[in-house]
Amino acid sequence: MAVKRALISVYDKTGVADFCRELHRLGIEILSTGGTAKELKAAGIPVTEISDFTGSPEVFGGRVKTLHPKVHGGILYRRKEHAKEAEKHGIEPIDMVVVNLYPFEKTIAKKEATQQEIIENIDIGGPAMIRSAAKNFESVAVVVDPSDYTGLLKELGEKKDFSNETRRRLMEKAFARTAEYDWAISGYFGKREGFPLMYELRFKKEFPLRYGENPHQQATAYSLLGSTSIFHSPVYSDEKMSYNNYLDADAAFGLISEFAGENACAIIKHTNPCGGALGKSLKEAYEKALQTDTLSAYGGIIAFGKKVDKETAQAIGNKFVEVIIAPGYEEGVLEILRTKKKRRIIDISSLIDTKERYNYRQVFGGLLSQEKDSLIFDKAALKVVSKKKPTKTELEDLEFATKFVKHTKSNALIIAKGLQVLGVGAGQMSRVDSCKTSIWKAKEAKFDLKGSVVSSDAFLPFRDTLDEYAKVGVSALLEPGGSIKDKEVIEAADNYGMALVFSGVRHFRH
């Protein structure tokens, strides 16, 4: 079954003239449409316009040109079973379909794109031809990617046809492309409803991972189509990122995004912060963050709010750090950081300005979807419920601590002072246990807790947490409020002369 007739209709005209010139040299008749036909004619390549082939003009400004029985019949009919019927209706075979689609994905990515422009970039005839050719792949070769042109010309030159393996590979690629295209359209218009009736999340395999959370689990990295992925961020290391490295790096990215452009440092261990600070310099922020919990920081993830400078890189030195993430690195910094073998260094510049609205979490047999937690709290809505009012410095520390507590597993409590994390209570089944853990960790680091503040991710169900913090000198605490024991907690704050602020915003992180 030699290829004798090809239909060419492409938006992306990369390499199409050279490709068609070779098809013509091999004796293959070329059918084409609109702008593609004009380009091929301008290149001196003989072309039969699709309207001449079908006997019907292109209509409605080109909206309808290939949706015709002679086109789809020529692609779809079974060569042996339907040969007489095709002859009866004057339908001639089309042996190869070369199509790529209107740039819908690129159009919706443009901030200035109008609704009309977006709608006009929904291709109809292109996907129809691709699907028709892919369905009949045993008789029709379907080409959707210009990067395939060279290899296909070589095979045609040698055999005048394509192998079954080649046809099947092209078919699989074609269906993948139409599925991706339809998902982009569905996803774009579905977003208007917030939570559409049907989710069809599509992921592209990026690379295999050495193993999963544990060595006996196989693992692979997939990126969500249409989204900016951490898997596309440059990794400056010969050592590959692991499954757990990516989990921790993602947690670190979420936290440090709260401090984008600031002299900020956060240290992450097992997806929880174990240190953090703001400083007059990035180096100072790192050194203060490290003081929080030097033991847990060993083998952790260090995240920075701005480009890493040489001074900070030298301060890190040869300490054992699994991963460093930052929105860029100044000249000469990578050479310093890479002197420690097996250290992964990620540039998250491309992720900083992303505005993903939703996040997803798999459960057995299903998916949970929610809006991202984009709040800290509304300063204007803060309610001081104690007799003592927090100072300006205490309010600044409370806001700083809340940015950390938001990214800490519940039950979560953060002690802070001087824009530095002093103690972390994370992931305990009772809030008072998280409280005691945060105090113990702060004392282990030999911090003076007098005048420190605490942020809680959820309300205090009893006064016991406040009782414990009062013993060590905490002067202000922020929580959402809303417990049936609020009155009791407020009375305790007043007894201790502690400022108590209700934010009205809960930050559970399970």
Image: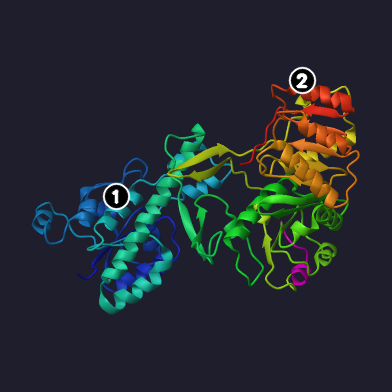
Q: CA distance from mark 1 to mark 2?
A: 73 Å
Please state the horizontal and vertical placement of residue 387, each as a whole percent of the image: 87, 22
Q: Is residue 491 magenta?
A: no
Q: Which residue is mark 1?
A: 66
Locate the C terminus by quadrant: top right
Going by the image, does 57 lie left or right of 501?
left
Q: Quadrant of residue 177?
A: bottom left
Q: Residue at x 22, y 71 (%)?
A: 2
Q: How far across and how far down the image is residue 139, in percent?
A: 22, 63
The earlier-in-sequence mark between 1 and 2 is 1
Residue 289's x, y, as percent? 81, 53
**Residue at left 51%, top 49%?**
226
Point out the frontmost of discs 1 and 2: 2
* 76 over 5 or under it: above or below: above
> Toward the viewer: 364 or 14?
364
Q: Vertical placement of 396 versus 83: above or below?
A: above
Q: Is residue 375 left or right of residue 471?
A: left
Assess disc 2: are there few (<14), some (14-19) or many (≥20) residues with their C-alpha within 10 Å of its C-alpha: some
Q: Secondary structure at mark 1?
A: loop
Looking at the image, the residue that sits furthest to the bottom is: 158
In the rendered structure, which amino acid carries the disc numbered 1? Thr
Residue 84 image position (x, y, % from top left): 8, 57
Between 447 and 230, the one nearer to me in the picture = 447
Residue range in magenta is 327-337
User: Label 2 amino acid?
Assistant: Lys
The one nearer the camera, 287 or 411, is 411
Element under label 2?
helix
